[in-house]
């Protein structure tokens, strides 16, 4: 078996850490005991000697989170062998990346959405270049972004969202005219926390 690339091994090491989960994330999870299980993939790849990820803009016809920016993924199916299988199956269905081409690296802390989904978030390496063939019924577009671009100080702000009558602070990222908030923003925050925990992202 071929040894994974050095950048993959480095990120795997950085993800093996003790996470400090924000109080607000824990409170939402505890306040939503009947949340439905779901899983997403946080894809990483090297392009032009930089580390990149990709997100999707959900279509206006999906059942939930219409038009929002998210990592590929979805609800757990009865015949999924594991949450990881949910994440890679949904990724293949949504944007055409073959599940067999995705290498599992690690996992971010789970989050629960305001709409009642309990999300497992898996980090996976994907080959580059790749051929994206998104399903227009689920995905309006695919957004490729270098990790460096997510780290700009003017890119992120904090905004209050009302949940069960309470004002909940959530990070908000502004990216290429898109707004990333809620569960996806918390996942982006956790990803950046791991990738820059030693001052810079791995190359």
Image (spheres, rainbow, N blue to C red):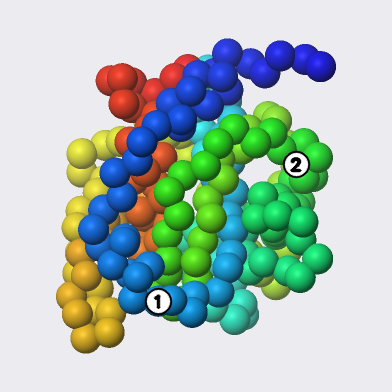
SS type, badge 2: loop
Q: Which mark is residue 67?
A: none
**In the image, is residue 138 above or below residue 81?**
below
Residue 156 spot, x, y in % from top left: 25, 49
2 vs 1, front mark: 1
User: Is 166 displayed left or right of 179 in the figure?
Assistant: left
Say which of 21 and 195 sits in front. Answer: 21
**In the image, is residue 47 above or below residue 86?**
above
Say which of 59 and 112 sits in front. Answer: 112
Q: How many marks?
A: 2
In space, the residues marked 2 and 1 are separated at their CA atoms by 37 Å
**In the image, is residue 136 above or below residue 109?**
below
Q: Residue at x 68, y 29 (%)?
A: 128
Say which of 85 and 192 sits in front. Answer: 85
User: Is 51 displayed left or right of 138 in the figure?
Assistant: left
Residue 62 spot, x, y in % from top left: 61, 77
Q: Quadrant of the N terminus?
A: top right
List the residue tagged with mark 1.
Answer: 32
Q: Residue at x 77, y 45 (%)?
A: 99
Tell me if I can see residue 29 in this picture: yes
Q: Badges 2 and 1: C-beta atoms under 8 Å apart?
A: no
Mark 1: give few (<14), some (14-19) or many (20+) Cα within 10 Å: some
Mark found first going from the N terminus, 2 or 1 = 1
SS type, badge 1: loop
Residue 106 spot, x, y in % from top left: 55, 36
Residue 77 spot, x, y in % from top left: 73, 69
Q: Residue at x 56, y 19 (%)?
A: 9
List the residue tagged with mark 2.
Answer: 131
**In the image, is residue 148 above or below residue 176?**
above
Mark 2: give few (<14), some (14-19) or many (20+) Cα within 10 Å: few
Q: Residue at x 71, y 38 (%)?
A: 102
């Amino acid at each position: 078996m071929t040894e994974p690339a050095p950048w993959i091994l480095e990120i795997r090491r950085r993800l093996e850490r003790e996470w400090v989960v924000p109080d607000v994330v824990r409170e939402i999870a505890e306040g939503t005991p009947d949340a439905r299980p779901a899983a997403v993939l946080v894809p990483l790849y090297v392009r032009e000697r930089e580390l990149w990820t990709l997100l999707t803009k959900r279509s206006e016809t999906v059942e939930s989170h219409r038009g929002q920016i998210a990592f590929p993924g979805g609800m757990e199916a009865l015949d999924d062998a594991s949450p990881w299988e949910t994440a890679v199956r949904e990724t293949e269905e949504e944007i055409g990346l073959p599940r067999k081409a995705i290498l599992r690296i690690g996992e971010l802390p789970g989050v629960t959405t305001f709409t009642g989904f309990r999300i497992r978030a898996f980090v996976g390496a994907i080959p580059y270049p790749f051929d994206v063939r998104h399903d227009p019924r689920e995905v309006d577009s695919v957004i490729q972004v270098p990790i460096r671009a997510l780290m700009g100080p003017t890119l992120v702000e904090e905004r209050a969202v009302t949940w069960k009558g309470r004002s909940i602070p959530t990070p908000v990222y502004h990216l290429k005219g898109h707004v990333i908030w809620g569960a996806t923003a918390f996942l982006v925050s956790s990803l950046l926390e791991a990738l820059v925990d030693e001052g810079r992202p791995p190359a």
